[in-house]
Image (tube, rainbow, N blue to C red):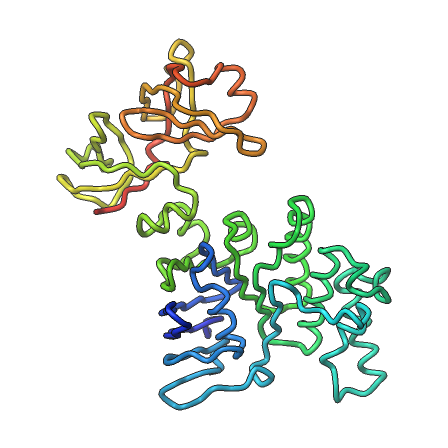
Amino acid sequence: MQPLLDLAIRLRAGEFTLDAEIVAPGGPLVIIGPSGAGKTLTLRAIAGIVRPDAGRIALNGRVLFDSSQRLSLPPQARRVGYVPQEYALFPHLTAEGNIGYGLRGMGATNKRRRVAELIALTGLEEQRRLYPGHLSGGQRQRVAIARALAVNPDVLLLDEPFAALDVPTRQALMDDMQHLLERSGTAAVIVTHDRNEALRLAAYVAVLVAGRVRQTGTPAEVFSSPANEEVAAFVGVETIAAGHVREIEDGVPIVYVSGRTIEGGSGVAVCAEVLVCLRPEDVTIASPSRLTAESSARNHLPATVQRVVPAGPYVRVELDAGFLLVALVTRQSTEALGLARGVEVVATFKAAAVHLLRV
C-alpha cells in the first residue's frame, strides 16, 4: 500500500530553510509544531503554491514534484483541495457561490447537483444564500472546506483549520471535521500548533521544529515517547530533569536525579546519563499524612509547592522535589489539599509514566 505522503524537500525562504522528510502511511496526517517551524510552508509546497529547491513529493504514490526529473505539477493538476488559514472566501459570493466557484467547465445541472451535495454534507442548508460577512467563523470554515471538496480532491490540505475559532466552537467543529472526512472518504493533511487537535484528529503525526521533522509516528508514540528534548517540551512534557542510571532492578531503571531516586523508563543501560521526562497529568499530589500504602505508584517524592497557576479547568502546580516537578490537578484537589506556596506534599507517579531520553 502506498503511503499517504512521501516527502523529502529542501526549500529556502529568505533566511529560513525548510529541510523536511515525512513518510506517513495513512491519514489523517497532522503536521504539528510551534509558530515559525515551517508547517504552512510544507503545506504550500505540497499544494504547489511554492516550489522546493530540491527533493520529491508524492501523494498516494503519485509524484507531484521531483527535482531530479525536473517534474513539478501545477497546483490545478495535483488533485488536492487547499484550505488556507484565513479561508480566502470571495466576499461578493454567497456560500453556494463560493462552493461552486471552482466547478467551471461543468454543466449547469451537474454543478447545481454537486453544490447541493456539498451543502448537505457540511450542514449549510440554512446559510447557502448568505454572504461570508454574515456567516460565523465556523460556517465560513465549512464553506471553505466544501469549496475545497467540490473538485473531488485526492487529499484535503488544511492549514490551522480551527485557529480563528473560540474554544467551544473549535471543540464542536473538530467532531464535525472527523465525521466530514469519514463521510467524504477524503484523506487529509492538517497543519496545527495545537496538541489537542493533533491528539483528536491524527492517525499519524509529524513534529516539525525549526524547519526539520524531529519525530513521526502515531499520536500515542509521539506523545508518550518523544524522541528528544525539543519534541518532549512541545508535546506537553513539563518535567525534564537530568539524571544518572545507577542500576536496573527487575528490568526497571533506577535513576538518581538531584539526590532523589526515580524508578521507570526503559531502553537505557547502567551508568547512562539521561533526561527524565514526565507529563504533568501523570503526577499526583497527596498530603504526607494522607498518603495511603495501597498506592500503586512506585515513585513517592517529598516536595514543596513553589507556584500554583490556574490552567482552565485544572491547576498547574510547580513543585520543588530537588528538581522542578510539574503536576496538573483539579481545582477540587487544590482546595482540598490547601495547595499554596510553601506547603509540603508528596508527589507520586507510576514507573510507566516515566520516559527516559539518553543524553
> Which residue is the extreme one toward the top?
289
In the image, is 21 to the left or to the right of 181? left
Q: Name the foreground residue: 247 vs 69.
A: 69
Residue 304 horizontal/vertical position (percent): 35, 19
Residue 281 horizontal/vertical position (percent): 45, 34
Residue 58 horizontal/vertical position (percent): 46, 78
In the image, is 143 to the left or to the right of 12? right
Residue 80 horizontal/vertical position (percent): 59, 76
State whether residue 163 is above or below residue 350. Answer: below
In the image, is 159 to the left or to the right of 21? right
Q: How many marks?
A: 0
> Which residue is the extreme one toward the left?
271
- Identify the residue shown where x is 32% and y is 39%: 240
In the image, is 211 to the left or to the right of 322? right
State whether residue 136 is above or below residue 187. Answer: above
Q: Is residue 348 visible to us here?
A: yes
- Identify the residue shown where x is 41% and y is 29%: 283
- Identify the residue shown where x is 37% and y is 14%: 344
Q: Name the foreground residue: 285 vs 12.
A: 12
Q: Is residue 291 visible to us here?
A: no
State whether residue 31 is above or below residue 97. Answer: above
State whether residue 111 is above or below residue 43. Answer: below
Q: Name the foreground residue: 42 vs 353.
A: 42
- Identify the residue shown where x is 32% and y is 52%: 227
> Which residue is the extreme one toward the front?
14
